[in-house]
Amino acid sequence: MRIKYIVLLALIILIAIIGFRTISFFTEGRSYYFKHTDSTNLSNESFGKVRLHDNIHNSSFVKHYGTPLSREDNDLYNYYHWEGGLETASIINGKDKGDIVRLIIGEVEEGVKTKTSLKTAKGIVIGSTKQDVIASYGSSYYKRTEQGADIVGYVDRKLRATIEFWLAEDGKVAEIRLDDTNID
């Protein structure tokens, strides 16, 4: 009889632990993965000489990219599509208005396949393989799934930044996102 209580208690503790981790996963979102992955140095990352927290109203940015091809408004950020396959998300208002919090390069822009010469600091491009990514960025990555895509991601805790490689069904990189960790 005593063994049954011990087994029951152990089972309850196990269920509580699993339940807590599941709740943490759903309430923390992407940040759940960040906490469980070793930090990777992303200080050299930029796409087409654009870095996180650059401002889209800065004269050097405007000189290089001109005016956006299109804009998508969001409650928190404005998304802009630029010549050359770059997409940015920037802060809508306040003292940081125009600061870029997400950079995206991908193979599809507004439903149209595009070619881009943009690449990461370590040379990963659209069409690179998952193996190319891991060989370039290392084995301290997290895996997750969103919108049906497998994602390999790296986090830089010091910079509070992530880089994610969204993989197509064939296992090749279809989209690359460089994000401030505060963006959802």
Image: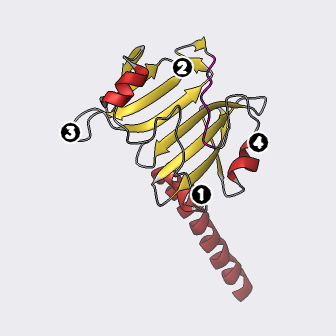
Are the two marked residues, 3 and 1, in contact with CB atoms closer than 8 angstroms?
no
The local secondary structure at tag 4 comes to helix
Q: Which residue is mark 4?
A: 132
Along the line of sight, the residue nearer the viewer: 107 or 32: 107
Pick whichever of labels 2 and 3 is earlier in the sequence: 2
Q: Are marks 1 and 4 in contact (CB under 8 Å)?
A: no
User: Whole-Å distance between the Cαs marked 3 and 1?
Assistant: 31 Å
User: Which residue position is annotated with label 1?
Assistant: 40
Is residue 118 inside the magenta stretch? yes
Q: How far separated are the C-alphas under marks 1 and 2?
A: 28 Å
Tell me the residue that label 3 is attached to: 94
- Secondary structure under tag 3 reads loop
Residue 170 drawn at (x, y percent): 79, 29
Looking at the image, residue 75 sits to the left or right of residue 131; the answer is left
From the viewer's perspective, is residue 165 above or below residue 60? below
* 76 to the left or right of 115: left
Q: In the rendered image of this protein, does residue 48 appear above or below residue 31?
A: above
Q: Tell me the magenta residue range.
A: 115-121
In the rendered structure, which amino acid carries the disc numbered 2?
A: Gly
**Which residue was labeled with disc 2?**
84
Q: Earlier in the sequence, mark 4 or mark 2?
A: 2
Please state which amino acid type lies under the numbered disc 4. Asp
